[in-house]
Image: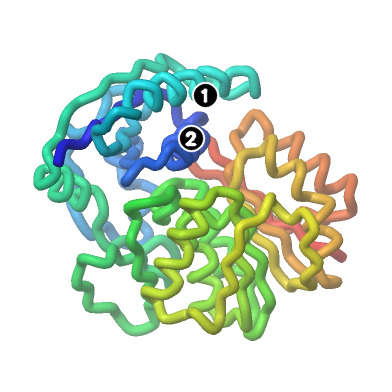
Amino acid sequence: MSWNELVVHTTNEATEAIANILNDFGANGVVIEDPNDLTIEKRAQYGELYELDPTKYPKEGIRIKAYFIHNDEWKAKKEAIQLQITALEQHGINIGANTIDVNTVVEEDWENEWKKYFKPMKVSDKIVIVPSWENYEHQPGEKIIKMDPGMAFGTGTHPTTMLSLQAVESVINQDDIVLDVGSGSGVLSIAAVLLGAKHVYSYDLDEVAVSSTKVNRDMNNFEQLMTVKQNDLLKNIHQPANLIVSNILADILLLVIDDAWNNLLPNGYFITSGIIEDKADLVQTKMEERGFIIVEKSEQERWISFIAQKK
């Protein structure tokens, strides 16, 4: 079988939005090549577990690769993807060069290449993310998330996901009820269970993300501790929670704030990530207007994360 490798040259700011678009169109895997990863500064405190090849990364900007089965629908699908990516500019997202190339890859090469991009990685003081095909001997105190990153964005390696994981680890309490809004691959939900949550409710509008969250949930044997549903953010959700985490774009995040407040129990925490530097003040102002107290603001590679509390 042949695969179409679609390569988008863009910016860090547009990475998550474009990855979501590619997944919405049925990408069988999304790879992000970010030259910032070569510095490894953000991972140094947790220990680097493998070497990165500089020749695989662009000199500037971000390169996103997505893999699609070659069939009669491909031409129309590629054109539709291009239109949606270009339309991101209407939402104030800088898409940079926005060049798109397509390569043909045979299945065996695709499978081998895909797995090179994912190795065991420690993303917080306790959490280590391990791809399903890797063997990893965990150290005392580590909590392991087994992941199949092939179908949805959010494997723990992107700054917004790492910020979210570290925030969850810092505020979660034993037996908390947690809501994960925009679950993606389910990595934040699984981490919450590992860190002591009594139950996690995972929501995503995208069918691929919902399916991926369920696969990863089952891989970690958390069927009884995680409820996974397709839902538009927190609309019509009435589930009292101690902690809500949402790693989505700032413009969409603004639509979650009121519902997050209504579902949070007193003194509960609301963790937000996926916020580009230019929109951090907008999100913070909206949360504070609703009554949230900003407990902590974190930054990594111009991405911002907030820990807010409902006092």
178, 295: nearer the viewer: 178
* 79 or 186: nearer the viewer: 79
Q: Amino acid at mark 1?
A: Gln
- The residue where tag 2 is placed is 21
SS category of the residue bearing label 2? helix
Q: Is residue 219 visible?
A: yes
Residue 255 versus residue 48 in the image, above or below: above
Q: Determine which of the numbered discs, if any, sits on residue 257 in the image.
A: none
Query: Residue beneath label 1, please?
Result: 84
Which amino acid lies under the numbered mark 2 shown in the image of this protein? Ile
Asked if marks 1 and 2 touch (Cβ < 8 Å), the reply is yes
- Quadrant showing the C terminus: bottom right
* Residue shown at the point (49%, 23%) measured from the top left: 85
Crowding around mark 1 (Cα neighbors within 10 Å: few <14, some 14 to 19, many 20+) is some
**Apparent side of residue 293 relative to residue 12 in the rendered image (left or right):** right
Residue 70 relative to residue 152: left or right: left
For image coordinates 45% across by 31% down, the residue present is: 12
